[in-house]
Amino acid sequence: MIMKKLSYYFLSIFILIFFILLIDFTLSNTILDYKSCYKYEKLYYELKKNCVGKYRFKKSFPIVKTITDEMGLRVGEKSFPKKKEKKNIFLFGDSFTYGIGIEFEKTFAGLIERKFSNYNVYNFGVGSYSPSVYLYKLKKTLNENIIPEKILLFLDLTDLIDEASRWVYIDGIDKVKLTNDHVFQRSKKKEKFTKRNFKLINNLLSYINYYSRNLKELANIRLSEKRKIKTSIQGSFTYTEQDSLDKRFWKNDTFLKGRTNLKKRLLQIADISKKNNIEFYLIIYPWAETLEFGQKKFSWSEFGKEICSNRNCHLIDAFPDFQNYKNRNINWSTELYFLNDEHFNEIGANLLFNAVVSRIKK
């Protein structure tokens, strides 16, 4: 009798698990079969035009909707249609400006679009882009006779190493390309069977893991005032001696090459802006690690001043705004950034938005 009951229970559990897996498999290949809006070429990538899809930066991040317009720029469901009679604002940036992990309307790009509703706002932000790509996109768009009144360029800490080893701008023919085809080759790889066909379970486990880690981090801060700040290869140059940077990524000339290329491309954009009577704003902002460990080895703020000195360039340094927030809030790192990541969450994006719009000429 006992064996019969146990057999019944095991059979019931087996049937339940089978149906859960069957439902997950079905949903993963229908409703949860998210379309990617990224278009990959061998030495270049961009967003597809007129695309509606889903994007997740990494497994601990939420899945957010991606909508692009006829130019392949990220927009929101409530974005204003672009009209010829309106003046234009261009936003240039990388994954921060794209707004990973956040629905478009709550990104700082989306907030800027809503604030400047009397303008056409073009968001050229795409993950791991840098000023070489912005220069290429700017020239291409100007050639299409779309002229901005303002350019807001969000300079990210990754731009230095990206200008040294990721992107190459070819002067003379005005082309940009990646230094290798790693991104293209990675895009061709298929997801593992379990990840591809059991998205529901994988997503659930990822969210449980993320929120449990978040709660643990908040508990550590409240109990011992200690926090774990993620450090990175790309952003460590502001507080680490150059000789001590990770040699796998920072070769002997990487820092100098990146700094030189970065300055060159930004000055070219400033000169084009001056020639076309465009207000050019260079915007810098901190990662959590920059706020925690400072800029003693290389000042990002001073670099911004150097670029904008004696040029058609208005510097917006958001570091003080974030520092003030940090000074007032013990949980600043988890309130402004995704857990163990450099990217802004909704509160961080809103803080940067306010820092920017308060300093733009009306």
Image (cartoon, rainbow, N blue to C red):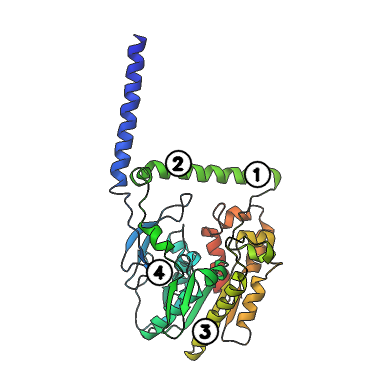
Residue at x 33%, y 44% (from the top left corner): 197
Q: Nearer the viewer, mark 4 or mark 3?
A: 4
Which label is found at residue 21?
none
Upstream in sequence: badge 1 or badge 2: 2
Looking at the rendered image, the disc whose residue lies closer to the viewer, 1 or 2, is: 2
Going from N to C along the chain, the mark reached first, 3 or 1, is 1
Image marks 1 and 2: residues in contact by CB distance under 8 Å: no
Q: Amino acid at mark 4?
A: Leu
Q: Left of 359 or right of it: where is 275? A: left
- Horizontal side of 212 relative to 238 (left or right) equals left
Amino acid at pointer 1: Asn
Q: Work out how far the residue at label 1 is from the one at label 2, CA to CA, in angstroms.
A: 23 Å
Distance (Cα) linking label 4 and label 1: 44 Å
Horizontal and vertical percent position of residue 170: 45, 80
Nearer to the camera, 260 or 152: 260
Name the kind of residue labelled 3 in the image: Gln
Q: Secondary structure at mark 4?
A: loop
- Which-is-in-front pick, marks 3 and 1? 3
Residue position for label 1: 220
Label 3 – label 1 distance at C-alpha:
47 Å
Q: Residue at x 59, y 86 (%)?
A: 311
The mark lying in front, picked from 4 and 2, is 4
Q: Earlier in the sequence, mark 3 or mark 2?
A: 2
Mark identifier at residue 205 = 2
Label 4 sits on residue? 43
Q: Are marks 3 and 1 in contact (CB under 8 Å)?
A: no
**Residue 268, numbered label:** 3
In this rendering, position of residue 236 left or right of residue 203:
right
* Callout 1: SS: helix
Question: 5 or 166, which lies in front?
Answer: 166
